[in-house]
Amino acid sequence: MSGENEAEGGELGLNEARQVARAVERAREAGRTRWVAFVVDARVGLRFEHSLRCYASAGKRDRFLWNRSESGDFSVCWGVADEIESAGVGRFRDVRAWSEEIRARIDWIGDARPATAATFFGGFGFEAESRGSAEWKAFPAARFFLPEVITESREGRTRGVFIARVEPSSSVESVVSDLRARRAELQRIGRCGVASDREAFSETEAPESVAQDPTSLDDWPAGPEYRVRADRSHGIFCAQVRTALDAFTGGELSKVVLARSLSIDHDDALDVSAFLGRLHVLYPTCTLIAMGRGEDTFLAATPETLIRVSDGAVETTALAGSAPRGRHPEEDRTLAERLLSSSKERSEHAHVVEAIRGVLEGACGSLEIPEVPALRPLLGIQHLETPIRGRLKSGMESEAESDALTLVEALHPTPAVGGAPRAAAEDFLHRFERLDRGWYAAPIGWLDSQGGGDFSVALRSGLIRNGIAEPGRSGASRALLFAGAGIVEGSDPEEELIETRIKLRALLAPLTEI
């Protein structure tokens, strides 16, 4: 550390070392842990494939990827500088208290970084208590972490953030060494080079070589094995829909969302990065999210924002009511017009809009809610969508009743993924759906350093589990894919089954690539 100018190239210079020394002294005086976050602004933009390379390079460490394709913004992080797990009705409050405590003890050094940038990453289970399933052991009812390394692209600027833990017993030299090691790791990943979109996402494996003149088809090598099994028969799912319709007649429910799952056993490791790359190409208007722990990854290519809070501005989306896409433009227009005019689909959508309105009216001084929903076309399916925007009431931006996690808690689960009334729908699902949803259809996202954040509903989602058995054996890895359908009065069981098939195919095809 020869002088202050070293910091200009993203090195820890004399000024940064002094700031680290002050953090060490504060930790020593208070007898409590602190953190130092060193920010390096690269002042250039990076493409999405860089985020995939970083995610893959994290190995089995805790890792998180968040990408909004429409804006080109992404965050990728790994390593654990601190963490929290919680369960029960207080899980949202526990995460809020933890994040508030941590952010009050972070010393930011280096380049400037917006206070609205992502700092804490994680998600919640659909239910307040984990069911104890082995499949979801890496993803409890609530888990968030402060990472050791964040690389992010925002508004065309790329930054690296390197975070080190400062204990009362830490030395300045040890903290500086940790920060330098984390920065050096990110530099090594960058020097590996970045593949083009075509190289990374079109073909992930080279074609097998075969004999020039095979004597029989037996000479062709076998392709990969995928064994697909639904969690229940089609008949049972349709019977569950009819049970829900009976509950509507009795006045217990007005809507319930029934989900089902597919398990896919594979004879080798599932390539998570390649899967994410394909989802990025196929669903460019969706938010792509992945959280990995050890050999397990939960991921989603979701079209639905639960809540976004930034500098007092609030955004969310009501997404409910679905129809397939057409095989040609004329059929597509017909299906779209039918969806927009369907009283059944509009009723399902209205449940979601009114539930969101009821939550946000208390926190926002103004709300913008279009009277008529628009269409959200995706590959294979289209939805009714109502964007909702507002601003927090004056003076509430930093108060607990209007921070991002408070709104997440109030909104989850929306009628788009649970039902209405909420308590009756949750009771119905517990008794009749009998599916451990884990993090499916639950809030996943990030918090900034001032109480804001960005959370999506984990739709079009799946759990990838590698390392279950030795490669080469069926069941060496497993994927669980999830999809649901909103049931309201007038629903047809067979049509709801078809809707779940369309949604499951959205993940099954890019996962298997057969």
Image (cartoon, rainbow, N blue to C red):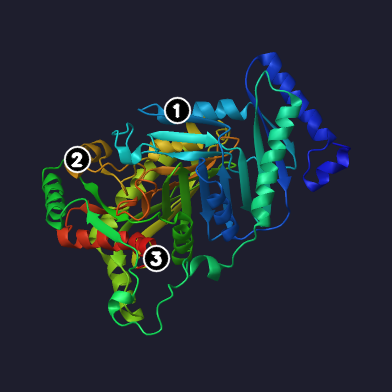
Residue 93's disc number? 1
Kind of residue indicated by mark 2? Phe
Task: For label 3, count other residues whose C-alpha is less than 10 Å away and answer few (under 14), some (14-19) or many (20+).
Answer: some
Precedes in sequence: disc 2 or disc 1:
1
Gap between marks 3 and 2 measured at Cα: 30 Å
Whether the residues at callouts 1 and 3 have beta carbons within 8 Å, the answer is no
Side (left or right) of 260 relative to 94:
left
Kind of residue indicated by mark 3? Leu
Residue 440 position, x and y percent, is: 35, 46
Query: Which image quarter holds the N terminus?
Result: top right
Q: Secondary structure at mark 3?
A: strand
Give the answer, above or below, for where 1 lies relative to 504. Answer: above
Precedes in sequence: disc 1 or disc 3:
1
Q: Residue at x 40, y 35 (%)?
A: 409
Q: Residue at x 61, y 61 (%)?
A: 47
Gap between marks 1 and 3 measured at Cα: 35 Å
Q: Which residue is mark 2?
A: 428
Q: Nearer the viewer, residue 353 or 230?
A: 230
Side (left or right) of 435 relative to 59:
left
| Residue 346 figure quarter | bottom left
Q: Nearer the viewer, residue 369 or 234?
A: 234
